[in-house]
């Protein structure tokens, strides 16, 4: 098995195909000792998944399902996956979540133009971990369509759920609404023990992290609207 450092955790896994190999190389680590998470190579499982999902290649199935296993086991370490694009500016991570195709990556790309020095931490599936009573966004090799990530842990300033709009506007979101939004954009375990861990973690997240609704277009006013509301004062 090869060793990696992902989201502050020691991970042993054995990538076989180039997609996972290439995206995991930034996370390679040779730390001694026992791994926190082990992801075995499951050839037969990936082949079965390829039959069930014929639009995905075997390589893509290895990539997707190894990520699914990592994010499930992440719950044992006070962490969860969020389907979001995470942009870093002024030392904080700003998270933008939405169903695929809404434009979260388009929105964070505007931040890169508007705010020099900003960068994408993970463009599709950052890990979110609770460490010392603070939530951190973490880069991982599982980044969606494009290989855009950094092997870093950055404090979370806020999360906004995006919808397309003609005008740019941002408002706070109630915890009740935010919980259902969060559950729709993360891995929902079938095992009740893991589901309990997820719900407990989200309960703390809703208390500690400001959550917003962002209606936005693709003008430079969009990142300004988001940043002015979400930045730490």
Image (cartoon, grey):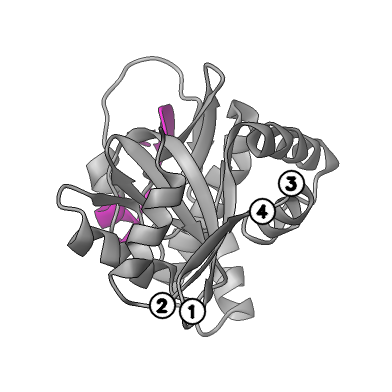
The residue beneath circle 1 is 101
- Which of the image's four quarters has the N terminus? top left
- Image point 55% across, 51% down: which residue? 82
The residue beneath circle 2 is 217
Q: Residues within 10 Å of mark 2 (few under 14, many from 20)?
A: some
| Horizontal and vertical percent position of residue 133 | 56, 19
Q: CA distance from mark 4 to mark 1?
A: 22 Å
Q: Earlier in the sequence, mark 2 or mark 1?
A: 1
SS state under label 2 = loop
Magenta region, residue range: 1-23
Q: CA distance from mark 2 to mark 3?
A: 25 Å
Point out the residue furthest to the left here. 116
Q: Earlier in the sequence, mark 3 or mark 1?
A: 1
Q: Is residue 11 magenta?
A: yes
User: Can the viewer see residue 78 in this picture?
Assistant: yes
- Image point 40% across, 28% down: which residue? 8
| Viewer-side residue, 129 vs 21 | 129
Q: Earlier in the sequence, mark 4 or mark 1?
A: 1
Q: Judge depth for marks 4 and 1 and give the one in front.
A: 4
| Viewer-side residue, 176 vs 34 | 176
> Do the residues bearing badges 3 and 4 touch, measured as CB atoms within 8 Å?
yes
The residue beneath circle 3 is 175
Q: Is residue 41 magenta?
A: no
The residue beneath circle 4 is 173
């Amino acid at each position: 098995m090869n060793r990696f450092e992902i989201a502050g955790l020691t991970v042993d896994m054995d990538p076989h195909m180039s997609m996972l190999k290439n995206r995991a190389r930034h996370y390679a680590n040779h730390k001694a000792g026992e791994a926190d998470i082990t992801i075995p190579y499951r050839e037969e499982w990936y082949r079965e998944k390829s039959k069930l999902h014929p639009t995905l290649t075997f390589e893509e199935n290895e990539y997707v399902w190894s990520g699914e296993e990592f994010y499930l086991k992440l719950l044992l370490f006070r962490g969860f996956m969020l389907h979001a694009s995470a942009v870093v500016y002024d030392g904080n991570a700003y998270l933008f979540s939405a169903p695929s195709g809404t434009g979260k990556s388009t929105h964070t790309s505007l931040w890169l133009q508007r705010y020099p020095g900003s960068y994408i931490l993970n463009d599709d599936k950052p890990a979110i971990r609770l460490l010392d009573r603070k939530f951190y966004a973490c880069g991982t090799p599982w980044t969606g369509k494009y290989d855009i990530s950094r092997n870093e842990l950055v404090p979370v300033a806020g999360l906004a759920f995006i919808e397309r709009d003609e005008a740019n506007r941002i408002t706070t979101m109630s915890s009740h609404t935010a919980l259902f939004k969060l559950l729709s954009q993360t891995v929902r375990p079938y095992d009740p023990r893991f589901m309990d861990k997820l719900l407990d973690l989200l309960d703390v997240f809703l208390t500690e992290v400001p959550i917003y609704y962002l209606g936005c277009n693709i003008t430079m006013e969009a990142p300004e609207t988001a940043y002015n509301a979400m930045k730490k004062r």
